[in-house]
């Protein structure tokens, strides 16, 4: 049976290095994870690609929120894609929908044409598309390599039945990669239920600030804010656990 490909979500050089040490096969690089991930900076893209030998797929998303973009936003995406395509990245991760929830085929076709020969993944915009099976066929016709999905549910575990049907209908024409809520306790069951051979995980853990002096009276974020003196990053031990569980 085909070895399971383990893709790990990263947002820093340190996270990328931790994922590599833990046994990741591929990275998805983005920033602003609180918003579901947006296009990383040029400096971060170059630094991560230089730091690890793994394939790096870069997020192409100009903002958080929905996936229906203005002309100005699409222009930004095209400019970002031009940089990604010459950066040494292995692939690009994107998703564009029309107002009615259908895949925006004309714009997606432009992204694919500009991205090749990079690998192309359609991200979880798929999970808010109007009909997953119609969207799947649209992506296959466009020539997309991979779709990341939670089965149009909050987590992969809840969407496993839909993912299994997507895998069945895909029939090898596109990779269906579960992602969203995968944990060590459920990863083996998800693979068994869905038949997927690639998975997408965050494998994150807390990182404590290096600051000795800490003024907690001055927040640097909005309300409902994350702690100022800690953050999440990839936990090498968790990546190793996933690697063992899926091998």
Image: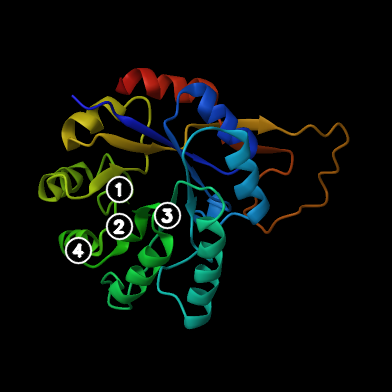
Q: Is residue 64 left or right of residue 13?
A: left
The image quarter in which residue 126 lies: bottom left
Q: Which mark is residue 160?
A: none
Q: Is residue 96 left or right of residue 44?
A: left
Q: How is the image coloured?
A: rainbow
Q: Earlier in the sequence, mark 3 or mark 2?
A: 3
Residue 102 appears anywhere in the view: yes
As measured in the structure, the alpha-carbon distance from the residue carrying label 2 to the one carrying label 1 is: 7 Å
As measured in the structure, the alpha-carbon distance from the residue carrying label 3 to the one carrying label 1 is: 16 Å
Instruction: Please state which of residues 112 and 200 is positioned toward the viewer in this rendering.
Output: 112
Q: Looking at the picture, how far across and down is residue 63, in whole percent?
A: 53, 65
Instruction: Please state which of residues 83 and 73 is positioned toward the viewer in this rendering.
Output: 83
Residue pointed to by mark 1: 150
Q: Are marks 2 and 1 in contact (CB under 8 Å)?
A: yes
Q: Secondary structure at mark 3?
A: strand
Check disc 3: other Cα within 10 Å, few if <14, some if 14-19, many if 20+. many
As measured in the structure, the alpha-carbon distance from the residue carrying label 1 to the one carrying label 4 is: 21 Å
Q: Secondary structure at mark 4?
A: helix
Residue pointed to by mark 3: 93
Nearer the viewer's eye, disc 3 or disc 1? 3
Give the residue at the far right of this rendering.
213
Q: Secondary structure at mark 2?
A: helix
Q: Which mark is residue 127?
A: 2
Q: Which mark is residue 141?
A: 4
Q: Is residue 117 above or below residue 4?
A: below
Q: Secondary structure at mark 1?
A: loop
Nearer the viewer's eye, disc 4 or disc 2? 4
Check disc 1: other Cα within 10 Å, few if <14, some if 14-19, many if 20+. many
As measured in the structure, the alpha-carbon distance from the residue carrying label 4 to the one carrying label 2 is: 18 Å
Q: Could you tell me which residue is drawn at 32 percent across and 44 percent down?
A: 155
Q: Earlier in the sequence, mark 4 or mark 3?
A: 3
């Amino acid at each position: 049976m085909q070895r399971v490909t383990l893709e790990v979500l990263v947002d820093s050089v340190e996270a990328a290095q931790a994922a590599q040490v833990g046994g990741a096969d591929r990275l998805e690089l983005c920033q602003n994870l609180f918003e579901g991930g947006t296009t990383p900076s040029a400096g971060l893209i170059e630094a991560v690609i230089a730091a690890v030998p793994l394939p790096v797929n870069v997020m192409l998303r100009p903002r958080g929120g929905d996936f229906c973009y203005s002309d100005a936003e699409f222009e930004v995406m095209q400019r970002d894609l031009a940089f990604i395509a010459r950066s040494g990245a292995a692939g690009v991760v994107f998703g564009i929908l029309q107002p009615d929830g259908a895949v925006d085929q004309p714009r997606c076709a432009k992204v694919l044409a500009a991205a090749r020969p990079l690998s192309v993944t359609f991200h979880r915009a798929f999970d808010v598309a109007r009909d997953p099976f119609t969207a799947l066929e649209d992506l296959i016709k466009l020539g997309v390599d991979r779709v990341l999905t939670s089965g149009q549910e909050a987590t992969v575990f809840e969407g496993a039945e839909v993912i299994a049907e997507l895998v069945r209908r895909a029939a090898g024409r596109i990779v269906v990669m579960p992602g969203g809520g995968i944990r060590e306790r459920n990863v083996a069951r998800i693979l068994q239920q869905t038949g997927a051979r690639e998975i997408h995980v965050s494998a994150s853990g807390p990182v404590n600030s290096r600051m000795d002096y800490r003024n907690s009276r001055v927040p640097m974020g909005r309300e409902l804010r994350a702690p100022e003196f800690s953050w999440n990053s990839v936990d090498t031990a968790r990546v190793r656990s996933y690697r063992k569980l899926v091998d």
